[in-house]
Image: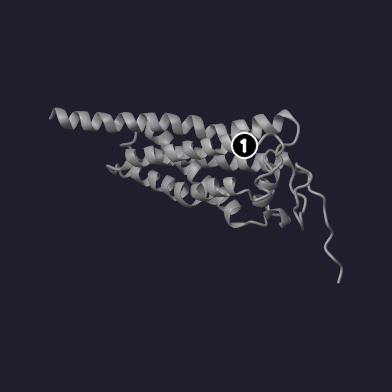
Amino acid sequence: MMAQQQHAHPYVPRTLELPGFVPPSFSSPFLFGVYGAASLLLVVLTWSISKRHAHLNKVERLLLCWWWFTGLTHVILEGYFVFTPDFYKKQSNFLADVWKEYSKGDSRYAARDMAVISVEGITAVLAGPASLLAVYSIIARRPYQHPLQLIISVGQLYGDAVYFITYFFGGTEHRLPGLTYFWLYIVFMNGIWVVIPSIIAIRSWNKIIHAFTKQKET
């Protein structure tokens, strides 16, 4: 029986051992294009469908778009990473290739570093389903919607803080040379989950404070 061909991985440090590594089947533009198109389609559909709920204002409809997007990203994309430790061995697999590509910016993902596994695991298992619950809480106008959104957003910020701290204190030996891998993969992609959760956390905090203040006045 013919032995499986061994491919050299593209990641740094070069001493990283990934036995059975299979090169990506899909190109970087294709991966970005599909993910971007799917995300845009989800947002557009959510925005359009949310019109049926007349009691929702524009901010709440935007929040629905965010929570659907971030919830499905956590559950599907990050969930795949957490529960597929040998993703770098997969062939012709879109989700596996997404992580093979992202590992060029941070090879700790391919190496199954415990810091990123812990962050991604908590995000996929807890923040993902909670984000989908936030969608329901907004539509149904549940009283826990703002505490829930605050908790999730703070959790996302904490996860980003842990990620960035461990990344920068670990040096640049995990990243391939080139501005793309740093500014696009590390800063921009993770920065989304810094900016938007910060805005939502402040909004939910103010809503909670306002509710307690109003209750105290009455």
Q: Is residue 48 visible?
A: no
| Crowd class of label 1 (few under 14; some 14 to 19; many from 20; radius 10 Å) | some
Tell whether 114 sits left or right of 138: right
Residue 18 location, x and y as percent? 75, 53
Within the image, what quadrant is residue 199 found in?
Answer: top left
Viewer-proximal residue, 209 or 30? 209
Residue 81 location, x and y as percent? 60, 51
Dot 1 amino acid type:
Tyr
Q: Residue at x 27, y 42 (%)?
A: 143
Within the image, what quadrant is residue 202 found in?
Answer: top left
Q: Residue at x 48, y 45 (%)?
A: 71
Position above or below: 51 against 75? above
Tell whether 201 sits left or right of 109: left
> Which quadrant, please, contains the C terminus?
top left
Considering the numbered disc 1 on the image, is that residue within a helix, a strand or a loop?
Answer: helix
Looking at this view, name the residue that lies furthest to the front. 169
Position above or below: 194 against 141? above
Where is mark 1, residue-wise?
Answer: 167
Viewer-proximal residue, 3 or 27? 3
Tell whether 24 sits left or right of 216: right
Residue 144 location, x and y as percent? 30, 43
Viewer-proximal residue, 30 or 164? 164
Looking at this view, name the residue that lies furthest to the left. 218
Residue 178 location, x and y as percent? 75, 30
